[in-house]
Amino acid sequence: MTAEPGSEIERLIQLLARLPGLGPRSARRAALHLIKKREPLMVPLASAITDALDKVCECSVCGNVDTVDPCAICRDPKREGGLLIVVEDVADLWALERAGAHKARYHVLGGVLSALDGVGPDDLRIAALVERAADPAVSEIVIAVNATVEGQTTAHYITDALAGTNVDVSRLAHGVPVGGELDYLDEGTLTQAIRARTPF
Amino acid sequence: MTAEPGSEIERLIQLLARLPGLGPRSARRAALHLIKKREPLMVPLASAITDALDKVCECSVCGNVDTVDPCAICRDPKREGGLLIVVEDVADLWALERAGAHKARYHVLGGVLSALDGVGPDDLRIAALVERAADPAVSEIVIAVNATVEGQTTAHYITDALAGTNVDVSRLAHGVPVGGELDYLDEGTLTQAIRARTPF
C-alpha cells in the first residue's frame, strides 16, 4: 500500500498497533507524533526501550519485573515477611503498591487457570508459591486474584494446593467500592456486601 | 513512587504516556506488554524506532514524511502534475492516499491558522505553496483542509494568497457522508447537501 510510504514508517506503525490500547488508526497517529516530536520524544523513547531491554528482568523470587533480581520489594527489609499477596499479574502488583494497601511481599502467578485458553497449573507459578509457603517465616497468604470466574477457580486451586502447609489462606473482601453508588452495583456485589456487613 | 520499581520502567511508562491515545494507565499496560513480549515485540520496536530515526525525513517539496527526499509521491511520474491537493497534516495526506481518491501531488501545510494557539501564516508552509503555484505546470489547487472554523479560515487565507497566480482554486465538496444517515447529520451539512444537490 502506498498510504504510508517508506517501509520504515509502515513497520513502525505495524509494531505500535500491537501495543494494547492502540489500533491501526491510533498507531498511525502515534507514529506521526513520534516523527514530528523527533528530539523531545522519539529519541528518548528509543533509548528508554533499549535501556529497559538491557536492564529489566523478572524477579526469580516473586515474578515482579525490576532492574534487579531479586526485585526491590523482595529485598526491602521493611516489608512484613510473614505475609504474601498472590496476584495474577505485575499490573495488579503495581495497583496494590500504588494504593499503599499493605507493606507485604508478593507472588505473581503470571495469569489464571483457563481451560479455554489452555492455561493449566504448570503454566502458572503455583509450584513456586507452594515452595515459598513451606518457609516457616511465611504465616499468611492473601489470594488477590481478580473477581472473575477464572480468578476464583484459580483461587480455589491454590487453596487446595496450600492445604498441606501451615499458612493461613485468605482472600480480598467483596463489597461496595469506596465512592460507589448502590444503584449502579450488580446483585452479586450487593448480596456479598450485606452478608459481610460490619458493625458501625 | 515505588509502584513501578526501576527507573528504566518508570521512564518507559512516562514516555509511552506522551503518545496520543495512551494515558498513564494504558502506558503502564503497554510497558508491561512490551516487557512480557520481549523478543516478538520489544526488540523489533526498538529497532523500528531507531531505523525510522535514521531514515525518515520531511519531503522538501510537499512536506510529506518519507525515507527519501523528495518523497515517493513527488517523484512518482504517474501522478497528475497539474493538480496539487493542500492538506493540513501528513495524516490527512495518508487518508486521501488510502482512499485512492486522486493520483495527484500534495502540499502539507503543517497545521492551520489559529489565533488562540498563536499559529500565523509564517508558521505554515503557505509561502512554499504560492511558490509551487507559480510553476506553469500547476493548473489547479484543491484545498482539502478540515471542515473546522480554523480550517476554513486557513482556506480563505490561502485563496487570497493564491489570487495573484493563474491556478484554479477549489475545495472539497460538503454533503452527506457515504453510508451516512440523514437523521444523525447536523443542520449545516444537510443545508449544504441540499444546496449542492446533483441531478440523478
Image (spheres, coloured by chain):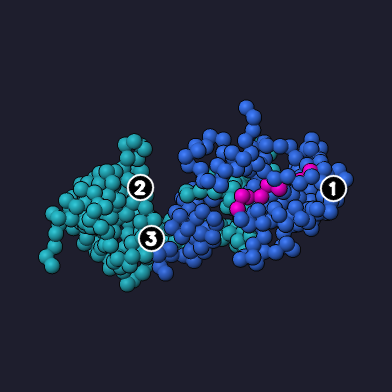
Chain colours: A cyan, B blue
Residue B22: image location, x then y, percent: 50, 55
The residue at the point 32 percent across, 59 percent down is: A106
Disc 2 element: loop
The residue at the point 13 percent across, 67 percent down is: A200
Disc 3 element: helix
Asked if badges 1 and 3 are on one and the same chain, I answer no
Seen as rendered, the residue at the extreme front is B195
Left or right of B61 on screen, residue A136: left
From the viewer's perspective, is residue A181 above or below residue B147?
below
Quadrant of residue B164 within the rendered picture: bottom right
Seen as rendered, the residue at the extreme top is B200
Which residues are the magenta region?
A: B140-148
Left or right of B65 on screen, residue A95: left
Chain of the residue where label 2 is placed in the rendered structure? A
The residue at the point 58 percent across, 52 percent down is: A30
Q: Are there few (<14), some (14-19), or many (20+) residues within 10 Å of tag 2?
A: many
Q: In front of the other: label 1 or label 3?
A: 1
Chain of the residue where label 3 is placed in the rendered structure? A
Q: Which mark is residue A111?
A: 2
Q: Earlier in the sequence, mark 3 or mark 2?
A: 3
Residue indicated by mark 3: A94
Residues at marks 1 and 3, CA–CA distance in whole angstroms: 63 Å
Residues at marks 3 and 2, CA–CA distance in whole angstroms: 15 Å
Q: Is residue B51 magenta?
A: no
Residue A11: image location, x then y, percent: 62, 44
Residue A12 visible in the shown view: yes
Quadrant of residue A112 within the rendered picture: top left
The residue at the point 28 percent across, 55 percent down is: A144
Residue indicated by mark 1: B166
Left or right of A137 on screen, residue B83: right
Chain of the residue where label 1 is placed in the rendered structure? B
Amino acid type of the residue that numbered disc 2 sits on in the rendered structure? Gly
